[in-house]
Image: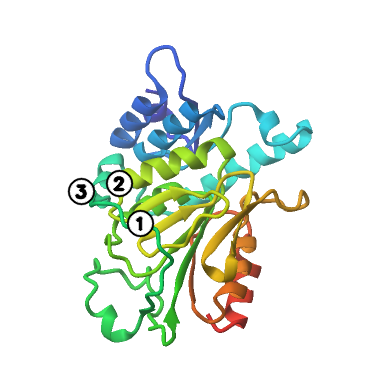
Amino acid sequence: ELVKKLSPDVVTMDYEMPVMDGVTAIRHIMAEKPTPILMFSSLTYEGARVTLDALDAGAVDFLPKNFEDIARDAGKMQEVLKKRILTIAKQSKATVNIPTSATVDAQIPLVKKTSKRDSKPSTTRANVRSSTSKQVQAAPLSARQVTKTRSINHPVDLLVIGASTGGPVALQKVLAKLPADFPIPILVVQHMPATFTAAFAERLNGLCSISVMHGKDGDILSKGTAIIAPGAKQMIVSGKGHKIGILNGDERLTYKPSVDVTFGSAAKAFPGKVLAVVLTGMGADGREGCRLLKQSGS
């Protein structure tokens, strides 16, 4: 009722509320007066599932309910919260239409699961050229959405995707559209807490035709399989490009997992043979990794 009356720029919301739970409230708000919503979440497996439900319903982003999980210094906690709220507010002003849950649901096809593929190392190359791009039936995009298109004139042996704020919903849309026989392996780095990435991988695996798994040290890269980087760890390509390694990583790194770390290792393992995608979000993670990939010819 207050959202309809006051038209706020941003709403911050907990899942646990006395009259209506947070996910139900989000659905009502997005149906009646779409507004950017920042959820507060407990860092548990169940909390992760609820938060992913909230993002599906239309929430823009989430933060841990216990701010000590963000930073031990009170001043830094305040800065993180303020920055996140201001970023969401600015993004909302730049967005003409905030998608309602109905719109989001309509854009995510409910794909019937096919049998899981075997986990042998991939030897198939995807030659992504203009001729193959004609076979892809994509929705028409406005001139503002596309500045230019460009075919890729080198073989692609690996797809890597990096995402931050807004990534969970966007990744769900993208990965759900890939066919079960997608010809190369996929590595996904999404900024998420450790307790969230396993639930996220589980959800994607249920929605997608491709197989989606939570990354474990030594997992084999397989065509038609996406591996989600585990939270609080770093994921690298190792074993001459046939498997992944999961590391604790340097404490000085801001992001765990880090897009730069995974992209940089892919540049070494698959020089000139990677397709890298960075989804818009917060921060510059992925910039240096993209630089290394481009230098290697990808």
Q: Which residue is mark 2?
A: 207
C-alpha distance separating marks 2 and 3: 8 Å
Q: Which residue is mark 1?
A: 175
Report the residue at 63% width, 44% height from top: 232
How was this image coloured? rainbow
Residue 132 in percent (x, y) is at 27, 81
Identity, as a three-letter code, of the amino acid under mark 3? Lys
The earlier-in-sequence mark between 2 and 3 is 3
Q: How many marks?
A: 3
The earlier-in-sequence mark between 2 and 1 is 1
Q: Label 1: few (<14), some or many (≥20) within 10 Å?
A: many
Q: Which residue is mark 3?
A: 112
Identity, as a three-letter code, of the amino acid under mark 2? Leu
Identity, as a three-letter code, of the amino acid under mark 1? Leu
Q: Closest to the observer: 289 or 268?
A: 268
Q: Label 3: few (<14), some or many (≥20) within 10 Å?
A: few
Q: Nearer the viewer, mark 3 or mark 1?
A: 3
